[in-house]
Image (spheres, rainbow, N blue to C red):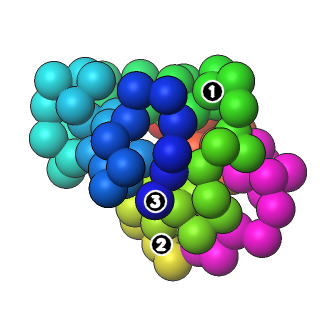
Amino acid sequence: MAFTKGMRQTEHLLDRLAREQDTVVSNLRLVMYYRHNTILKLICMPNKESVSLPEWSRTLSYLAETNLSINSYDEVDMVLNELFKSS
């Protein structure tokens, strides 16, 4: 679970991103408009450390459509940049 300002305590990062864009989670991966916006939002996120590494693994695995195990915040940036290149 991620705990950032404005997030509900039990809300996952994907849920928050979908809510902020007034859509459903599946659109974040399946609809290019939402996918691109989601990746940009995550790249520009000012305090990535406010989200736990397991939550980043879950979020990025979903967006990349593969099982990822994120072990550092540098990896978060690397994966986000790769996803952006492919979006």
> Residue sitting at 66 percent across and 63 percent down?
53
Q: Nearer the viewer, mark 3 or mark 1?
A: 3
Measure how far apart labels 2 and 1 are at the Cα level.
Answer: 22 Å
Relative vertical location of residue 43 with respect to residue 28 in this rendering, above or below: above
Measure how far apart labels 2 and 3 are at the Cα level.
Answer: 20 Å
Measure how far apart labels 3 and 1 are at the Cα level.
Answer: 16 Å
Image coordinates for residue 65, horizontal then vertical, percent: 41, 65
Q: Name the residue under label 3.
A: 1
Q: Which of 39 and 4 is in front in this view?
A: 4
Q: Residue 66 carries which label?
A: 2
Q: Give the range drawn in magenta.
A: 68-78
Q: Which mark is residue 7?
A: none
Q: Inspect this view and state whether residue 77 appears.
A: yes
Q: Is mark 3 on a helix, strand or loop?
A: loop
Q: Which of 86 and 61 is in front in this view?
A: 61
Q: Residues within 10 Å of mark 2 (few under 14, many from 20)?
A: few
50 left or right of 26? right
Image coordinates for residue 82, horizontal then vertical, percent: 67, 46
State the image quarter where residue 44 is shown. top right
Q: Which mark is residue 45?
A: 1
Number of numbered markers: 3
Q: What element carries label 2?
A: loop
Image coordinates for residue 32, horizontal then vertical, percent: 31, 31
Q: Residues within 10 Å of mark 1 (few under 14, many from 20)?
A: few
5 left or right of 16? right
Q: Which amino acid does label 1 sit on?
A: Met
